[in-house]
Image (cartoon, rainbow, N blue to C red):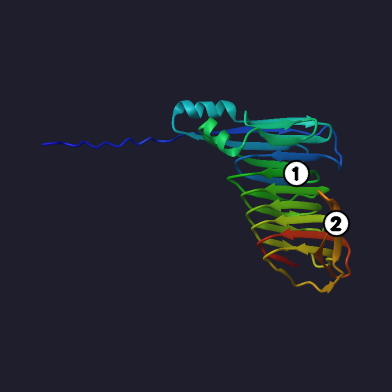
Amino acid sequence: MIFVFCCSLVTTAQKSTETIKKELQFNSTSKDNVFFVDNMHGAVKVEGYNGKTIIIEVVKTITGKSSEIVARGKREINLKVEKKGNKIYAYSDSPYTFFDIETGKYSHRENWNSRRSRRKYAYSLDFKIKVPNNVSIDVSTVNDGDIYVENMHGENISANNVNGAITLKNVSGATDVNALNKDINIVYTQNPTKESWYRSLNGDINIKFKDALNANVSHRTMNGDFYTNYSVSNLAPKVVKEQVRKSKGVKYKIRSKGQFKIGNGGVQLNFDQLNGNTIVKN
């Protein structure tokens, strides 16, 4: 008689959560002050307020199969804050990312697969920040979180998210937003007076402007439509000539975007999509 014994091994994931807090100020009050956030994994929430201090609170979460792996993650993943002139940078710091303070560029050292297999743990940094509401901001994240910005009225608002949504509520200023795979939702307290950009690959763009919107609109999409309750009139398509170098010489590629104006026309608003709709309303 043969006895067969079966056993199963259950590995319980280990998890560590801690909160990091930092406070800092710009050297002087200026319309040129810019606050940057560069994140890899996690959400970014920014709230504008009538104050002078940037208040940063970050929840750092590390998950791994053993306490040793989690401990390594706790050592390797950190929040870094740096100042250069009228710019302040807050970013996720690790052996797998690189930040150049001289250029303000944030980059990845390795490709996704090799980096994940090397570190053997998952992590997120969830940012919750209070910022003087007259400061320009440039915020980004890649995975595991949305970007939410509220009550900001600086010269410029820039937001980039690869796998999460972007929401801007009660904001003003020139706008540049790019959400690769989720929706963009914006509510303005004052219509933009400088050229603005709205980009999404696989999501919808929903924007609520104030009543008196006068704008020239450029809209390019592959599989979507543009909806609005504003008065619209057509403009001649804008033709762009691109120089393309070929083996037999230089050729020119001609492309055009849909062009129309809202109201009397004015500030340039650019919409660039692939698989989503745009809804613009008051």
In this view of the protein, can residue 215 be seen by the observer?
no
Residue 278 at x, y = what percent? 71, 64
Q: Which residue is mark 2?
A: 252
Q: Which residue is mark 1?
A: 138
Residue 7 at x, y = what percent? 26, 36
Q: Is residue 140 above or below residue 266?
A: above
Viewer-proximal residue among 251 and 279: 251
User: In terms of secondary structure, where does tag 2 sit?
Assistant: strand
Looking at the picture, which amino acid does disc 1 mark? Answer: Asp
Looking at the picture, which amino acid does disc 2 mark? Answer: Tyr
State which quarter of the image contains the C terminus: bottom right
Residue 159 at x, y = what percent? 72, 48
Marks 1 and 2 sit apart, C-alpha to C-alpha, by 35 Å
Work out whether mark 1 precedes mark 2 in sequence or the reverse, and give the earlier one: 1
From the viewer's perspective, tell me whether residue 189 is left or right of residue 56: right
From the viewer's perspective, tell me whether residue 267 is left or right of residue 138: right
